[in-house]
Image (spheres, coloured by chain):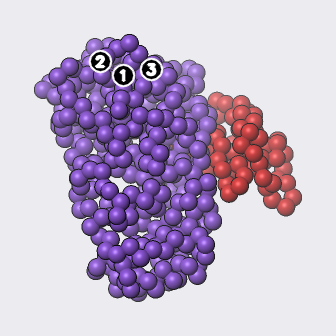
Chain colours: A purple, B red
Amino acid sequence: MDIHAARETKQQLLRTAATARAAAAPTGGLVVGVRVYGGGRYGLAVRHDGSAGAEVGARALELAGEDADVRDVGAIRALVGEPQRAHPQRLAPDAPAPAERALPGAPTPQAPGRWAAEVLQQRERPLRPGLSVAQEAVTAGTIGAFVVLAGDERRYLLSNNHVLADADRAEPGSAVLQPGSADGGGAGDVVGELAAAVPLRPATPTVVDAALARLDDDVEVDALYPVGAITTTAAADDDLVVEKVGRTTGLTRGVVTAVELDGVAVGYPGGVVTFDDQVEVAGVDGAFSAGGDSGSLVYDPVTRAAVGLLFAGSERGGPEGTGLTFCNPVDAVLEALGARLLG
Amino acid sequence: MSQPSPGGAPDVSRDAARAAKSRLASHLAGDQRVNGVGVVRRAQAYVVRVNVVADDDRPDLPAEVDGVPVQVDVVGPITASRAAR
């Protein structure tokens, strides 16, 4: 079944199995979600603990047939409901399980709370993906990645032009802060300086909103993401399940809902800029991003390949009407800056 | 551009959808009611997606372009995602 049918079937299952869910809830013995099989195929995922939730599993098989993935996985709560996560509801009970990372038995790469929005908005050293960052005149965006340039041993921080270069208004060499000023960053929080920005061109369609900050030599970096190191890239494809970690909404999961979007008109403080060849992402359960997540790297959690650089969002649209997120294709970003991802 | 095919949309390849997208995007270029024309997969076929700003002020759009179905989504304004002041 497709994603829409899977969501409808999931809701049908939840309605008809409300009593069983309530009985299983106190022990955390039941998780129901959308199963992502890849290639545009979706279904139901039911994870239960022995008899707790088994009835729901049987009902899922009735509703979805071979598209139902029902497993007795033992106790669930400790592995999917970390209390300090920024949005536990997005990556726990209702989330699809494409990477199987949320399932019992799978390793959790980082300690709980590491990717929580309230942590990412603080001053953090070493620097890592997802943290609040901004040029000194800008409110706050997100550290997308750390990169190196050919023939240059220094390390650079990747984010959007409108985060690190104030949408073409900042001078090269101006200070870049972690956290950004909206999160209390000031003169004591300088981590580097604006080094390069791909110009935003209001008059003609462009493809990327990207810039680099050269890091000061004494700034330590931890380049790992929730899934580990990300050093490869791939083109986004329809229905690809993706994740990002950002300053405002923390770790979230979404699905690529459109590719090669041309004529994406984006409002900036200085006017509208139109982008071509963009990637559109919808949140799996709620919005994928919000203001302040600009610059986040969007990646495939299964292959650990980067696919996009998050830069804009809409107020509405998407399967659940919670808005859409727009990303530059990551290969175009890296090519425009002559950069490669630092492992 | 054409009217919908009788009997529903046939399977459409990605290349066919790309060509239709380019044609429709050129036709809609500069229309401020539109903020994106792209390619979307629906089951086993591709369609052209047109994102519009408002439901009550959208351009006249064909149901199909060269046999490729056209899907419309109302997304509102798109803004750069840095933190608000």
Chain of the residue under label 1 = A
In the image, what residue type sits under mark 3? Leu
Q: Position of residue A77 (x, y in %)?
A: 29, 70
The reply to the same-chain question for discs 1 and 2 is yes
Is residue A209 in view from this perspective? yes
Q: Position of residue A328 (x, y in %)?
A: 50, 33
Check contact, mark 1 vs mark 3: CB within 8 A: no
Chain of the residue under label 3 = A
Q: Is residue A212 left or right of residue B72?
A: left
* Residue sitting at x 77%, y 41%: B16
Chain of the residue under label 2 = A
Q: Which residue is mark 1?
A: A148
A97 versus A69 height, above or below: above
* SS type, badge 1: strand
* Residue sitting at x 24%, y 55%: A112
Q: Which residue is mark 2?
A: A154
Q: Which residue is mark 3?
A: A337
Check contact, mark 3 vs mark 2: CB within 8 A: no
Quadrant occupied by the C terminus of chain A:
top left
The outermost residue toward the right is B6
Q: Point out which mark residue B44 bears.
A: none
